[in-house]
Amino acid sequence: MGWSLSDRMTADLVCHALKAAYWQCKPPVGVIMHTDRGSQYASQPHRQLLEAYGVIASMSRRANAWDNAAMEGFFKTLKVERIYHVRYATRAQARLDIVDWIEGFYNRQRLHSAIGYQTPAQRETALKVA
């Protein structure tokens, strides 16, 4: 739903991603955001933003990667299907390519068995209509 890229994993980074998701998708109050136990997600700025948007925070249990399996799967797919096949000359080039892959391919063309062989964009549209 939302993403952001940076050379450091900070509270600002995850807040920027949450803002992008919120303004792009306008999720209903009570939507759940699941994360790992990183300090950036537990930070006061991030928690305040979640509260302001009416988003319910859900964190993985300690040492339990299965709780966050959907996101772990996405990052594995991003690396295996794209990043490992491209050599980036600059961070800016990597940013443009990854954005294009996420928005142009992954969300709009790549079929996902977990959502009935639809694209994420198709599934989101169907959920909004229902």
Image (spheres, rainbow, N blue to C red):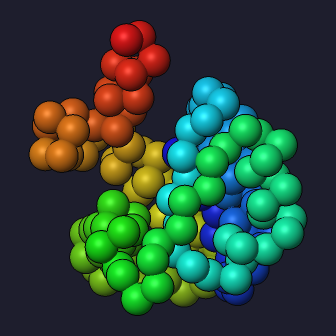
Residue 51 image point, x, y percent:
79, 47
84 relative to 94, above or below: below
Residue 86 image point, x, y percent:
36, 79
Q: Which residue is at a point 45% across and 77% down the rendered structure image?
A: 61
Q: Which residue is at a point 13% across and 45% down the rendered structure image?
A: 113
Residue 86 makes an appearance in the image: no
50 relative to 46, above or below: above
Horizontal placement of 84 versus 35: left or right? left
Residue 17 makes an appearance in the image: yes
Q: Residue 60 versus residue 75: which sits nearer the camera?
A: 60
Residue 71 image point, x, y percent:
39, 65
Give the quarter of the image for residue 107.
top left
Horizontal placement of 123 versus 91: left or right? left
Q: Residue 114 versus residue 43: which sits nearer the camera?
A: 43
Q: Which residue is at a point 41% across and 10% down the rendered structure image?
A: 129
Q: Residue 27 versus residue 12: which sits nearer the camera?
A: 27
Quarter placement of the C terminus: top left
Residue 106 image point, x, y percent:
34, 50
9 relative to 123, above or below: below
* Name of the residue lying farthest toward the top: 129
Horizontal placement of 6 versus 1: left or right? right
Q: Which residue is at a point 45% across and 18% down the rendered structure image?
A: 128
Q: How many marks?
A: 0
